[in-house]
Amino acid sequence: PFTVELARSGKTITVTPSESVLQAVAEAGSPVLASCSMGVCGTCEVGVLAGVPDHRDSLLSDAERAENDRMFVCVSRAVTERLVLDL
Ligand code: FES
């Protein structure tokens, strides 16, 4: 599990291995629009303010991943124990 802090709402949630960040933030009352839920369409892009995502999408280039400023929450998870998202 890892922790996701929602910067705008001030909520902190735990994402368990059995759920996606997309599911966890929706349960916390900060739903993100999603379409493919497979990391290929780009609909569920969310800004990353702190922490390092574990990118599992098929969209970001290596250079974009290195910028560490966004993630696709339907599939991507966290390398660090904590992520702060622009939600
Ligand atoms: Fe398509 Fe996340 S919903 S990339």
Image (cartoon, rainbow, N blue to C red):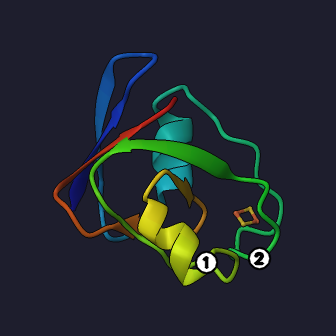
Residue matched to label 2: 40
Q: Locate residue 44 relative to residue 4 in the image: left or right.
A: right
The first of marks 2 and 1 along the sequence is 2
Residue 76 shows up from this direction:
no
Residue 48 shows up from this direction:
yes
The quarter of the image holding the N terminus is bottom left
Distance from mark 1 CB to nearest ligand 1 atom below 8 Å: yes
* Occupied quadrant, residue 60: bottom right
* Occupied quadrant, residue 49: top left
Q: Is residue 78 above or below residue 63?
A: above
Query: Residue at left 49%, top 71%?
Result: 65
Contact check, label 2 and label 1, Cβ < 8 Å: yes
Does dot 1 land on a helix, a strand or a loop? loop
Question: Nearest the camera: 61 or 37?
Answer: 61
Mark 1: few, some, or many residues within 10 Å (few <14, many ≥20)?
many
Residue matched to label 1: 57
Query: Residue at left 56%, top 52%?
Result: 22
Q: Locate residue 27 relative to residue 51 in the image: left or right.
A: right
Where is residue 43? Give x, y as percent.
Answer: 79, 54
